[in-house]
Amino acid sequence: MLTTVVIASINHVLRSESWASRRLQSFTGKTFCIRTFPLINLKMLINTTGELQKVDDSMNADATLTLSPLILPGLLARELNAFAQIKTSGNPALVEELINIGQHIDLKGIVEHDLSNAIGDIPAHRIAHAGEHLVQWQTKNIDRFSQTLIEYLTEENVFLIKPDTARRFAEEINYVQLNIEQLERRLNKLAQHNTFANE
């Protein structure tokens, strides 16, 4: 069900951006997989019209794009650093084309056009503009949350420490051990000296 809805949505976008369909036609018959753990694992075939269709999950994909759920808002906002975080494998030409198309598709324009047919140009523009701001706000919040979590795990949580802190701690332990060994040697010498003196 989810696969059908996602493919229908992507095909709607591809029909709105015919240049993207034309570019995908050169990969007719190729399959690719989009993975977003633990939510999505979609396998799709590029057909002769440059659109997508569902394929059997047992079929091997020619290319795979693995996305973290954290970068999805950044991808929707077409942020280049979000696209750089996609893990890829398989056919390099297909991977490059898929990422390139993703970077250049204007989702805001497509949504605005679809809405304008239903509610008019001005309300559609305002809704699309508000949606874009919402995505940007969400992206910033995810970035802030990620940074805060990293800081907590490395600064506050005693179970995870920075490598530099661990190294300094190990050096301090070695220094204390050397001092203890020196103190033991001195105590042994003093004990021996007292023994001889008493004899």
Image (cartoon, grey):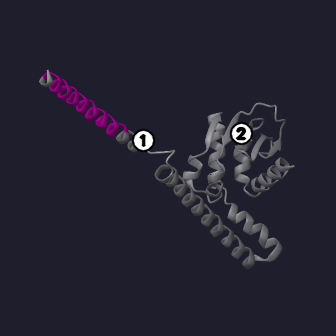
Q: What is the distance, in whole Å, between disc 1 and disc 2 at their CAs?
A: 48 Å
Mark 2 surroundings within 10 Å by alpha-carbon count, few (fewer than 14), some (14 through 19), many (20 or more): some
32, above or below 184, in the image: below
Dot 1 and dot 2 residues touching (CB under 8 Å): no
Q: Residue at x 85, y 49 (%)?
A: 4
Extreme residue toward the bottom, this view: 122
Residue 60 x %, y %: 76, 30
Classify residue 147 as left or right of residue 112. Answer: left
Q: Residue at x 51, y 54 (%)?
A: 152
Residue 145 magenta: no
Q: Residue at x 72, y 79 (%)?
A: 122
Extreme residue toward the left, this view: 197
Residue 12 x %, y %: 79, 56
Specify the quadrant of the image occupied by residue 24.
Answer: top right
Q: Earlier in the sequence, mark 1 or mark 2?
A: 2
195, above or below 112, in the image: above
Q: Amino acid at mark 1?
A: Pro
Classify residue 153 as left or right of residue 109. Answer: left
154, above or below 31, in the image: below
Q: Main secondary structure of the magenta part?
A: helix
Residue 182 magenta: yes
Q: Amino acid at mark 2?
A: Ser
- The quadrant in which the C terminus is found is top left
Magenta-colored span: 170-196
Q: Residue at x 83, y 42 (%)?
A: 54
For disc 2, the marked residue is: 26
Looking at the rendered structure, the secondary structure element under dot 1 is helix
Specify the quadrant of the image occupied by residue 27.
Answer: top right
16, above or below 119, in the image: above
- Front residue (pair 147, 121): 147
Looking at the rendered structure, the secondary structure element under dot 2 is helix
Rendered image: mark on residue 163: 1
